[in-house]
Amino acid sequence: MKANDKINVTKTFFPPLEEYQKQLERVWKNEWLTNRGELLKELEEKLKLYLKVPNIIVMNNGTVPIQIALKLLANQGEVITTPFSYVATSASIVWENCTPVFVDIHPEYLTIDETKIEAAITEKTTCILATHVFGNPCNIEAIEAIAQKHQLKVIYDAAHCFGVMYKDQSVFNYGDVSTCSFHATKLFHTGEGGAVFCKDEELQHKMFYSHNFGHKGPLDFYGLGINGKISELQAAMGLCILPYMNQIIHARKRTIDCYNNQLNFKNLQALKIREETNWNYSYYPVIFENEEKLLQLQKKMNDKNIFPRRYFYPSLNTINYLNKAEMPISESVAKRILCLPLSHCMEDLQTQIIVQTINE
Ligand SMILES: *Cc1c(COP(=O)(O)O)cnc(C)c1O
């Protein structure tokens, strides 16, 4: 790759094709393409070890597990949620006939502002659905205390959190349910894919049958279900990529160290990572003083063939089918935040060009 190549906000990791072919040979030999085959089961076992989690169900994307969790826990009530996330978070609430109730975010951590949650609770509130934005954990202890006091369920959209540790354990271990995305643009991917994590065995069992049409054997049903299954072709991709994860994360850390050391933060705000977090280097957002400066810089970068992305924009409370409550901090941050290019294969020269363009 050369300095004048197009640089996108991220670049999907492709394992060596021979390694993928090797996994596919197993699929051909088994003549088994989906419905929880050998490769998927192996991937789940390896992910459990890698992520240090007791349970995992790998699914077909990162949205269906949120929907299933809401179906099982939110009971069509009011769901307290963050306006600063990907649209899948809010859309899932509406899709499950629940009512999203937005609570504004913390201006530095960018996660839901736990001090504002209690004021939003009503007798219809059943659940809190919060996002660990850019792999940065919410204030988990505060949210857990509020949930216990008001008997609410907690679901974490942990789509960005592959490998994140919080207080010496996987961030996926917190909340009643955590979900992850294995989409091609995420840190670890299976093309399309995702997963759900929950410690409670009964809930785990419900999540499991819900992702497989509710089946109890071929002829009987535990309850309502949907198709959340992933195929062996996607599991094969996961098996090929997992051994490269430490390498991928290491390479991204190098780029982020360059950004951290060389960017001029006088007029620029970086993401504040929560204390006691072992972060995964999944995104590199910077926040400008105002939207005008962001747009100017975006244009300057695009002219140099560099394509950062406005992520997350817009603030979800401003989307037409969602409620229009004002969320001043989220709206302000959404207008001013830009994710800089970050991948496993950024070259120093490219990082330097990006740093110079911003610092100018
Ligand atoms: C990517 C993402 C999702 C959705 O995951 P898919 O695998 O694309 O369905 C949900 N929430 C957040 C915060 C995401 O970034």
Image: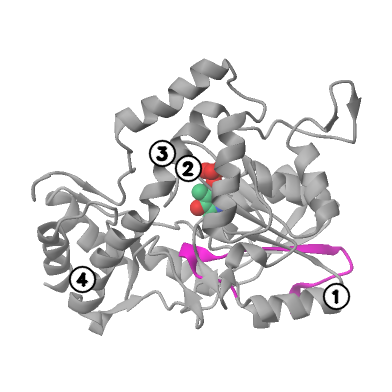
Q: Amino acid at mark 1?
A: His
Q: Is residue 151 above or below residue 208?
A: below
Query: Which residue position is annotated with label 3?
Result: 240
Mark 1 and mark 2: Cα distance apart in space: 34 Å
Label 3 or label 1, whichever comes before in sequence order: 1
> Is 177 positioned to the left or the right of 183 in the image?
right
The numbered mark at residue 356 is: none
Residue 281, image x, y percentages = 38, 64
Label 1 or label 2, whichever comes before in sequence order: 1
The numbered mark at residue 258 is: 4
Quadrant in the picture for the N terminus = top left
Of labels 3 and 4, the one closer to you: 3
Q: Is residue 236 above or below residue 262?
A: above
The reply to whether the C-beta atoms of the residues labelled 3 and 4 are less than 8 Å apart is no
What residue is shown at x 54% (from left), y 58% (from top)?
Answer: 51
Residue 118, image x, y percentages = 76, 79
What residue is shown at x 18% (from left), y 68% (from top)?
Answer: 358
Q: Amino acid at mark 2?
A: His
Q: Is residue 128 magenta?
A: yes
Q: Is residue 19 above or below residue 312?
A: above
Asked if residue 173 can be seen in this view, the reply is: yes
Q: Amino acid at mark 4?
A: Cys
Of labels 3 and 1, the one closer to you: 3
Residue 337, image x, y percentages = 37, 65
Query: Which residue position is annotated with label 2?
Result: 183
What residue is shown at x 35% (from left), y 75% (from top)?
Answer: 270
Mark 3 and mark 4: Cα distance apart in space: 29 Å
Q: How many marks?
A: 4
